[in-house]
Amino acid sequence: MSQTRLYFTAVKPASTEFFSKLEVAFEDDGLPIVIFEVDEDAGIEELSVYVDDDQIASVEARIRDTLGEAANDLTISHEPLGDVDWVAKSLEGLQPVRAGRFFVYGSHDRDKLQDGDIGIEIEAGLAFGTGHHGTTSGCLETIEAVVAAEQPKNALDLGTGSAVLAIALAKLAAIPVLATDIDPIATDVATDNVVLNDVAEHVTTATAPGFDDPVFSQHGPFELIVANILAGPLMELAPQMATHLAPNGSLILSGILDKQHDAVVAAYQNAGFRHISTLLREEWVTIHLK
């Protein structure tokens, strides 16, 4: 089906707030939402949502409903795209992202790598995780701190998406990493990115719908588990996380809104974990537990 880009401009910090709200509103729809800078000096950013043509009216209405009164001052434009690879299109404007020593980029930004960067190249794919989302960048920063302090000997990236976190672990620590997702398409994207980043020696990818899959017992228990999913599933998984985490291991959780923080921590405390730290990025938190 033909597709259309709905887009509008806004000025920082409002543009960042709009982007976070739209991500939350459309997170279950799988619609690509992109923000990129069009005028650095003026702080102007452009936000885009890519939709099938039969969704134009309903999605525009939801954008305005999500942004409330602020949408009254916005002009939402339409750009017909025809039959395009919307995933590749959605990533064209993304700028590379730094999170600690990590530098997440597309192939067109390879020349921006600097000495000392841990580069992670992520290409367009039907999987979440480019490093631009607050949850992913928060995870990357927390991973760097935990690995430096604890030097884990193996790790699990649960709900790996694009495998950006698994690749980060492999490049930073050169340890065995199991990267799993419930979606076979995401697993295929993850596998491609693992090969692209030359860490196939360390990262094993697998499609696994839950902890009952034998792949977890084959590779675990894990000294570090990273899970960037959503608050609801994370809370349900708390008892199983405790089972698969090695003694004195660390757990890094994200995909959690700031307002969901206390409920998630309480669920894990009930499963025997203790809270170590929380990192806030935009409206999202990354939680470190042991």
Image (cartoon, grey):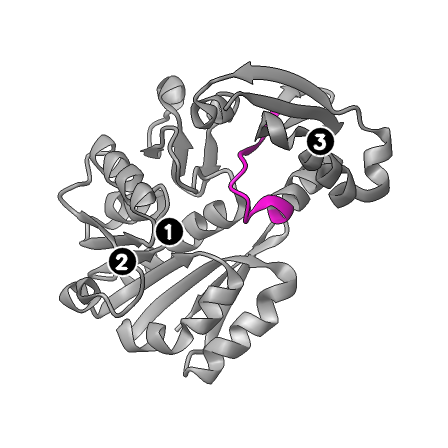
Q: In this rendering, is residue 166 above or below 215?
A: above
Q: Report helix, strand or loop for mark 1.
A: helix
Q: Name the kind of residue labelled 1 in the image.
A: Glu
Q: Name the kind of residue labelled 3 in the image.
A: Ala
C-alpha separation, residue under disc 3 versus residue under disc 2: 37 Å
> Pointer 1: what residue?
144
Q: Viewed as shown, does residue 271 lie left or right of 170?
A: right
| Residue 68 location, quadrant | top right
Going 29% across and 43% down the picture, which residue do you hit? 167
Q: Viewed as shown, does residue 287 lie left or right of 67?
A: left
At which x and y percent is residue 103? 40, 34
Q: Report helix, strand or loop for mark 2.
A: loop
Q: Is residue 225 or residue 99 the one in the foreground?
A: 225
Which sits earlier in the primary sequence, circle 1 or circle 3?
Answer: 3
For label 2, count other residues whose C-alpha is less than 10 Å away and answer few (under 14), some (14-19) or many (20+): many
Which sits earlier in the primary sequence, circle 3 or circle 2?
Answer: 3
* Screen quadrant of the C terminus: bottom left
Q: Nearer the viewer, mark 1 or mark 3?
A: 3
Going 50% across and 77% down the picture, which residue do you hit? 267
> Pointer 2: what residue?
208
Residue range of the region highlighted in magenta in the rendering: 24-36
| Residue 110 location, quadrant | top left
Return the mark for residue 57.
Answer: 3
For label 1, count other residues whose C-alpha is less than 10 Å away and answer few (under 14), some (14-19) or many (20+): some
Q: Is residue 162 or residue 52 the one in the foreground?
A: 52
Does the magenta run of residues contain 25? yes
Q: Report helix, strand or loop for mark 3.
A: helix
Going 62% across and 60% down the picture, which residue do you hit? 258
